[in-house]
Amino acid sequence: MSHVSPNQDPFRAIADPNRRKMLDLMLIEERTVGFLADELGIAQPSVSQHMQVLRLAGLVDARSEGRSTFYNVRAAELRTVADWITKYEAFWGKRLDALEDHLSRMKN
């Protein structure tokens, strides 16, 4: 993986549970800071700070309409995270298969 600044690191961006919830809410449709603040029960300035982290990591886009800014997920940018996790899915899949085989042999 190439070196990225901490502000651009998607792993850092999704490390916070509130940011993960925001991404989940934006998967359905684009959302405003006000909507996200209401849904999460946190202050709008906090949501804005979280959105800045997500934007710097390239995980969300912003679109202005009048006085409102709408945010949506750039899911393709999460590919780095998904690729990294895939290695561990294979690891655990092999481990669980081995456990199943071992338990099956113990029964016989």
Image (cartoon, grey):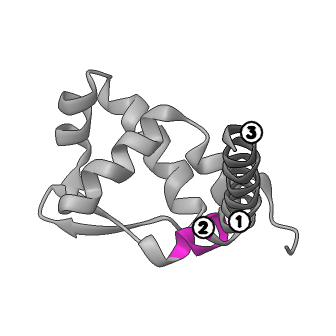
State the image coordinates of residue 40 (x, y, percent, origin top left): 28, 28
Q: Which mark is residue 108?
A: none
State the image coordinates of residue 73 (x, y, percent, origin top left): 36, 65
Please tell me which of labels 1 and 3 falls first in the chain: 1
Whether 61 is among the magenta residues is no
Please tell me which of labels 2 and 1 falls first in the chain: 2
Residue ID at (71%, 65%) = 90
The crowding category of the residue bearing disc 3, from other C-alpha atoms within 10 Å (few below 14, some 14 to 19, many at least 20), is few
Residue ID at (44%, 49%) = 51
Whether 79 is among the magenta residues is yes
Query: Which mark is nearer the camera, 2 or 1?
Result: 1
Instruction: Name the amino acid type tagged 1.
Output: Ala
Q: Nearer the viewer, residue 39 or 105?
A: 105
Instruction: Name the amino acid type tagged 2.
Output: Ala
Magenta span covers which residues? 77-82
Q: Which mark is residue 90?
A: 1
Query: Which mark is nearer the camera, 2 or 3?
Result: 3
User: Does residue 104 show up?
Assistant: yes
Query: Secondary structure under badge 1?
Result: helix
User: Does residue 8 show up?
Assistant: no
Q: Quadrant of the C terminus?
A: top right
Which residue is label 2 attached to? Answer: 82
Instruction: Name the amino acid type tagged 3.
Output: Met
Distance between the Cα atoms at labels 1 and 3?
24 Å
Q: Quadrant of the N terminus?
A: bottom right
Please tell me which of labels 2 and 3 falls first in the chain: 2
Distance between the Cα atoms at labels 2 and 1?
12 Å
**Drawn side of residue 49 relative to residue 40, left or right:** right
The crowding category of the residue bearing disc 1, from other C-alpha atoms within 10 Å (few below 14, some 14 to 19, many at least 20), is few
Which residue is label 3 attached to? Answer: 106
Above/below status of 47 relative to 8: above
Residue ID at (74%, 47%) = 105
